[in-house]
Image: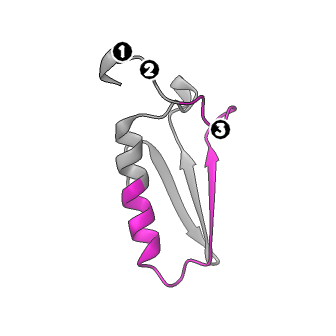
Amino acid sequence: MNFQYLLYKLKDGITTITVNRPDKLNAFTPGMADDLIAVLDHIDADDKVKAVVITGAVRPFCAGADLSSGKDT
């Protein structure tokens, strides 16, 4: 599976989702929300998944909402 802002890996029943926007300290965007919903829908349908770990590509895990769009955020 390929996503714009997330990395996804399934190994031994454990899914790792990595928030991957390191240039912006993983600040959360609507596009990331779309990717996260899509990957969670995929995981929900996969009986091989036994656990889910969500992590960030860099420190911090997530700087919060990306407010760079101003009032359109």
Q: CA distance from mark 2 to mark 3?
A: 17 Å
* Earlier sequence position, callout 2 versus callout 3: 3
As drawn, 49 above or below 6: below
Give the amino acid at mark 3: Phe
Considering the numbered disc 3 on the image, is that residue within a helix, a strand or a loop? loop
* Earlier sequence position, callout 1 versus callout 3: 3
Q: Nearer the viewer, mark 1 or mark 3?
A: 1
Considering the numbered disc 1 on the image, is that residue within a helix, a strand or a loop? helix
- Residue 27 shows in this picture: yes
Give the amino acid at mark 2: Leu
**Frontmost residue, 6 versus 32:** 32
Q: Is residue 21 magenta?
A: no
**Residue positioned 56% across, 30% down in the render:** 64
As drawn, 55 above or below 46: above
Of all residues, the one furthest to the bottom in this rendering is 47
Disc 1 + disc 2, Cβ < 8 Å: yes
Mark 2: few, some, or many residues within 10 Å (few <14, many ≥20)?
Answer: few
Disc 1 + disc 3, Cβ < 8 Å: no
The numbered mark at residue 70 is 1
Question: Which quadrant of the figure has residue 22?
Answer: top right
Of all residues, the one furthest to the front in this rendering is 71
Q: Nearer the viewer, mark 2 or mark 3?
A: 2
Give the amino acid at mark 1: Gly
Tell how many labels.
3
Residue range in magenta is 37-64
As drawn, 23 above or below 11: above
The numbered mark at residue 61 is 3
Q: How is the image coloured?
A: one colour
Considering the numbered disc 2 on the image, is that residue within a helix, a strand or a loop? loop
Which residue is label 2 attached to? 67
